[in-house]
Amino acid sequence: MESRWQVPITDRDIGGLAAEIDNNGYAVIKNYISTGELSELQEFVRKAAAGARGQYIGFEKNSEALTGTLLAELPKWPPFVEMCHSLADRSLGYDGPPFDIYQMVRVVTGDTGQRVSGVFHYDSYVLTALLPITIPNDGSGKLLLMKPTRRIRSSYLTNLLDKAVVGSKFMQKQLHKLAKRQSQRIDRLSLQPGNLYFFWGYRSIHTNEMVDQSSLRATALFHYGDPHTGNKLRDRIRAFRGLKHY
Ligand SMILES: [Fe+2]
């Protein structure tokens, strides 16, 4: 299928992708963007990394730097948004309200990049769609991903406890041990730039493998679906910590 941009629009397509994520932990649409578009994005992140002298950079949605790139267009493109919404609903188990896609473009390299990689976690949002742009040739920078390990929590507090447990030193150590001995419980995905990957970020423990200091890893992340919309405790925590997303 030629790109611009391939979208599974039928319920059957969405059902197939959701079943794949349930069973395998992830699903992928190969060559989601064209090779020409991919080259443009690779040039964009290469320049961004050079401008940042090799340190970590993150671009949020509506960031001026993304203007004119497909990264600005994609999260606002109705068929893409609908696809994310339909998929997120399959994981939620009900029709969730429309959600403003939370986007982050991460360009990781150098010392700072090493510090922001490697922490296993659950995302705050139901669906994670991941578009790899540049992945190191040396095989580093894999996505480490477990099959879904929890349900959607009806209580925000339980969600926080899950996150605290995974974030604890003990659990991080155990998870890194599993990853190191290449346990089958953790998939180590070699991401192909230009493919679009989906997983249940809220339900599956995951992280990025560290990249070598001299390597560049750039990915665009699109998050959809908030199981805790309007939760007062979370709003207070966000306000206290000055965060928009947690
Ligand atoms: Fe994540």
Image (cartoon, rainbow, N blue to C red):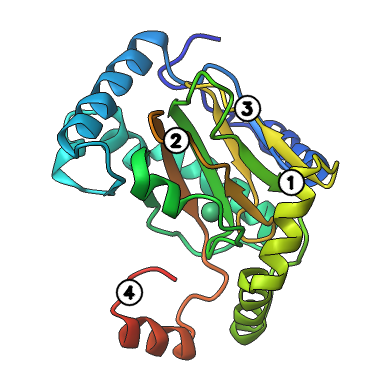
Q: What x and y, as percent, mark residue 221?
A: 44, 44
Q: How dense is the environment of label 2, judged by Cα within 10 Å: few (below 14), some, or many (20 and up)? A: some
Q: Which mark is residue 190?
A: 3
Q: Tell whether label 1 touches label 3 (CB within 8 Å).
A: no
Q: Residue at x 64, y 52 (%)?
A: 206
Q: CA distance from mark 3 to mark 2?
A: 27 Å
Q: Amino acid at mark 3?
A: Ser
Q: What x and y, as percent, mark residue 45?
A: 28, 29
Q: Residue at x 71, y 72 (%)?
A: 170
In the rendered structure, which disc, 3 or 2, sits on the residue that comes first in sequence? 2
Q: Which mark is residue 179?
A: 1
Q: Which mark is residue 8?
A: none
Q: Tell whether label 1 touches label 4 (CB within 8 Å).
A: no
Q: How dense is the environment of label 4, judged by Cα within 10 Å: few (below 14), some, or many (20 and up)? A: few
Identify the element where label 1 is drawn.
Answer: helix
Q: CA distance from mark 3 to mark 4?
A: 31 Å
Q: Amino acid at mark 1?
A: Ala
Q: CA distance from mark 4 to mark 1?
A: 31 Å
Q: Residue at x 81, y 43 (%)?
A: 181
From the image, tell me which residue sits under label 2.
79
Q: CA distance from mark 1 to mark 2?
A: 36 Å
- The relative height of residue 50 versus residue 164 in the rendered view (above or below) is above
Q: How dense is the environment of label 1, judged by Cα within 10 Å: few (below 14), some, or many (20 and up)? A: some
In the rendered structure, which disc, 3 or 4, sits on the residue that comes first in sequence? 3
Q: Does residue 131 appear left or right of residue 60 in this picture?
A: right
- The relative height of residue 175 versus residue 110 in the rendered view (above or below) is below
In the rendered structure, which disc, 4 or 1, sits on the residue that comes first in sequence? 1
